[in-house]
Image: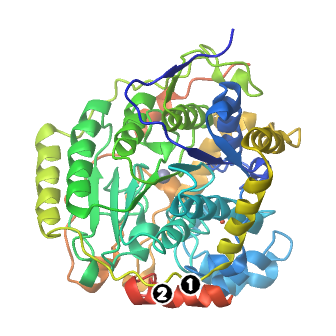
C-alpha cells in the first residue's frame, strides 16, 4: 500500500524547492559526537519513500565557495577552515585556539571533509535564497543548513559556517526586510549578532534560557543603534508544551508580521526543541513543532526553511519529513513507509514524535509577562522601515541562476525532475554505521568528558558554555548588547537542567569582484560585522 499523504484543505499551492546532497551523510564529527549529518539522509529517505518528490523539485546545490562564504566570514577564518585537516592540525595550534575558541571539549572538532561539509550546508541555503528571490519557488528547504551559532571568525556549537547569514544576505539583495525566526532549543546567537545593528533583518528566537548554551538571548536584548527593536528573544524554561508554545509563538509572530512586514522569511527549524532530544529540554511533539511551520507558511511570503539542531536522529528525520510535507501542502500518514533506515523507527514504526509527561516550568504568568514585554518592544518599531533599494550588483550565484534558466528552457519539467531525483538517490553505501550512536553509552562518555572541560574565559569575554554541558552550573554568557551597555540581569535564569530527558531514550530495535560589491552593499545598509562582541 502506498504511504499516505493527505492534502491539506484550503492551502495555496506552493512551488517548493528542496535541497539535498547525498554526500552530506558521509561526514562525521567523531565518535560520540551528538551532531550526526546522517540524520539529513534519514530525513531524505522518509521524504522520498513517502513520495514527496512528486510534489516538489529536488536539487543538489552548488557547494558554496570560499569567496561566497567571505560575504560574512573573515577571509582568514575561511582560509583556516579550508586548510585544516585531522592530519595537519598539529601545525595550526595557534589558529585553532583563535578560530575554534569555544572548542571546549570538542564541540567543534576538526574532521575529515570539514570544509566540504560547510560548503554543502551553505550552498543549499544560498541557492535556496537565490531561487526564492528570483521567484523560482515559494518555499526553499535546506535541512543541511540552519547552523545558527557560527560567528564571523569563530566556530561555535557544532557550527562553522553560518549558512543562514549567507542566505539572508542573498535575500537582502532583493528584499528590503527579512524576518528570521528560530525555533531551535538554543538561542540563534550567530544570526542575531550578524544583524544586531540593522533594521533590515528582524531576528526572533524562541529558546531555552538560563544555564544553557550559548548563554545569550535574554529578553532585554533587543538590538543596537539602527537595529534597536529589531532583535527579539523569547527565553523559555524547561518542558514547554505544544499548547504553551503555540500560545506565545502565534501572537508574537502575527504581531511581528503586522509591524515589520518582511519581504521574505527564514525559518530555522532546529528539532532539538522536540521532546526527548538528547540535548534539548523542551517538550514539543512533532505536531507542536510543525505548527510553527504551518503558521509561518500561512503568511504566504517567500520562505526559506533550514535545519539546525536535533540530536535524536529518528525524531529529527520524522519531524523534518513531516514539515517537508506541510511545505508541499500535505500531511504525511502515520505509518512510516519502508525505507533504508526502517529499523530506527521501531518499535512502533509511527511518524509521530510524542511529548512526554515532563513538568512544564513555563507558567502562564511567566509566558504572559514575556509576551507583554515583547509586544512593548515591538511598539518601538513604529511600522516597517523603508530602505532605498539600489541596483543589485552581480555576484557569482547570478551566473549559476543564469545557467539554471538555460537548463530549464532546454529540458521539459517532466524530464528534468526524474533525473534530479535520480541524482540525489545516487548514494554511497555503507554509511549506516552511526546506528550505534543512537544508544546511550558513548553519549554518556562524551558528556562526562565535556563537563570536566567547561571553561570560563578570563578577562570578561563571553563565557562559553558547551552544548553538552547543560545541567551543570556555569556563568551565563554576556550578549553583545550587554558587552556594550551596562550589565543586566537574567530574567529566566535559575531553572534546572535537563535531567528528565535521558529517561526518554528508548532503545531502538533492530555552505570576487562581485563579492566585494556585495560586501560594500552590505556595509551600506546592514551590519554584518560582529566586531561589537
Ligand atoms: Zn540547538
Quadrant where the C terminus sits is bottom left
Task: Decide if residue 306 is on the left or right side of residue 27.
Answer: left
The reply to whether discs 1 and 2 touch (Cβ–Cβ < 8 Å) is yes
Residue nearest the viewer, comparing 186 with 104: 186
Tell me if 213 is positioned left or right of 418 in this view: left
Q: Which residue is mark 2?
A: 521
- Residue at x 42% of width, y 61% of height: 188
Pick the residue in front: 34 or 258. Answer: 258
| Residue for point 66% across, 72% down | 397
What residue is shown with label 1?
393
Residue 126, position in %: x, y?
60, 65
Residue 72 vs 63, above or below: the answer is: below
Where, quadrant-wise, is the N terminus in this rendering?
A: top right
In the figure, residue 101 lies in which quadrant?
bottom right
Horizontal side of 382 relative to 270 (left or right) equals left
Element on which disc 2 rests: helix
Splitting the image into 4 quarters, where does residue 437 fall? Answer: top right
- Distance CA(mark 1)–CA(mark 2): 8 Å
Q: Nearer the viewer, residue 16 or 148?
A: 16
**Above or below, comparing residue 336 to residue 305 in the picture:** above
| The quadrant where residue 350 appears | top right
Q: Give coordinates of residue 362: x percent, y percent.
A: 22, 40
Q: Is residue 378 visible?
A: yes
Task: Tell me residue 489's x, y (percent).
Answer: 19, 68
Residue 522 vs residue 53: left or right? left
Amino acid at each position: 500500500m502506498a504511504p499516505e499523504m493527505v492534502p491539506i484543505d484550503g492551502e495555496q499551492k506552493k512551488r517548493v524547492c528542496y535541497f539535498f546532497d547525498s554526500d552530506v551523510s558521509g561526514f562525521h564529527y567523531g565518535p560520540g559526537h551528538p551532531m550526526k549529518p546522517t540524520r539529513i539522509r534519514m530525513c531524505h529517505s522518509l521524504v522520498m519513500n513517502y513520495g514527496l518528490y512528486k510534489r516538489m523539485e529536488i536539487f543538489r546545490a552548488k557547494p558554496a565557495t570560499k569567496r561566497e562564504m567571505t560575504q560574512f566570514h573573515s577571509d582568514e577564518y575561511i582560509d583556516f577552515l579550508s586548510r585544516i585537516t585531522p592530519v595537519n592540525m598539529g601545525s595550526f595550534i595557534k589558529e585553532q585556539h583563535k578560530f575554534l575558541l569555544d572548542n571546549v571539549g570538542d564541540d567543534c572538532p576538526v574532521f575529515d571533509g570539514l570544509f566540504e561539509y560547510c560548503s554543502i550546508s551553505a550552498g543549499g541555503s544560498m541557492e535556496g535564497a537565490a531561487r526564492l528571490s528570483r521567484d523560482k519557488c515559494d518555499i526553499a528547504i535546506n535541512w543541511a543548513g540552519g547552523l545558527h551559532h557560527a560567528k564571523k571568525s569563530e566556530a561555535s556549537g557544532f557550527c562553522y559556517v553560518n549558512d543562514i547569514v549567507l542566505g539572508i544576505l542573498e535575500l537582502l539583495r532583493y528584499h528590503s526586510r527579512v524576518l528570521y525566526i528560530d525555533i531551535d532549543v538554543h538561542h540563534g546567537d550567530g544570526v542575531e549578532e550578524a544583524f544586531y545593528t540593522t533594521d533590515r533583518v528582524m531576528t526572533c528566537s524562541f529558546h531555552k534560557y538560563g544555564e544553557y548554551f550559548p548563554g545569550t538571548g535574554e529578553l532585554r536584548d533587543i538590538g543596537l543603534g539602527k537595529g534597536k527593536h529589531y532583535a527579539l528573544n523569547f527565553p523559555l524554561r524547561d518542558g514547554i508544551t505544544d499548547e504553551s508554545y503555540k500560545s506565545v509563538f502565534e501572537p508574537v509572530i502575527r504581531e511581528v508580521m503586522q509591524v515589520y512586514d518582511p519581504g521574505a522569511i527564514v525559518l530555522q527549524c532546529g528539532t532539538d526543541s522536540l521532546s526527548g532530544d538528547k540535548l534539548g529540554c523542551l517538550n514539543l511533539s512533532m505536531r507542536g513543532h510543525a505548527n510553527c511551520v504551518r503558521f509561518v507558511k500561512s503568511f504566504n511570503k517567500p520562505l526559506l526553511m533550514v535545519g539546525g539542531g536535533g540530536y535524536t536522529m529518528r525524531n529529527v528525520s520524522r519531524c523534518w519529513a513531516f514539515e517537508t510535507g506541510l511545505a508541499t501542502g500535505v500531511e504525511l500518514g502515520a505509518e512510516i513507509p519502508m525505507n533504508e533506515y526502517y529499523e530506527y523507527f521501531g518499535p512502533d514504526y509511527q511518524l509521530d514524535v510524542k511529548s512526554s509527561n515532563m513538568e512544564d516550568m513555563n507558567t502562564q504568568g511567566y509566558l504572559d509577562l514575556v509576551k507583554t514585554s515583547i509586544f512593548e518592544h515591538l511598539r518601538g518599531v513604529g511600522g516597517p522601515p523603508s530602505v532605498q533599494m539600489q541596483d543589485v550588483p552581480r555576484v557569482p550565484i547570478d551566473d549559476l541562476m543564469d545557467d539554471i534558466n538555460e537548463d530549464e528552457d532546454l529540458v521539459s519539467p517532466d524530464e528534468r525532475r526524474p533525473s534530479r531525483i535520480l541524482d540525489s538517490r545516487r548514494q554511497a553505501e555503507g554509511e549506516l554505521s552511526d546506528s550505534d550512536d543512537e544508544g546511550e553509552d558513548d553519549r554518556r562518555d562524551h558528556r562526562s568528558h565535556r563537563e570536566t572541560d567547561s571553561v570560563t574565559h578570563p578577562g570578561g569575554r563571553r563565557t562559553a558554555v558547551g552544548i553538552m554541558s547543560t545541567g551543570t552550573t556555569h556563568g551565563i554568557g554576556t550578549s553583545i548588547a550587554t558587552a556594550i551597555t551596562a550589565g543586566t540581569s537574567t530574567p529566566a535564569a535559575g531553572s534546572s537542567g535537563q535531567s528528565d530527558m535521558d529517561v526518554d531514550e528508548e532503545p531502538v530495535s533492530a555552505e570576487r569582484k562581485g563579492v566585494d560589491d556585495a560586501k560594500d552593499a552590505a556595509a551600506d545598509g546592514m551590519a554584518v560585522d560582529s566586531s561589537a562582541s
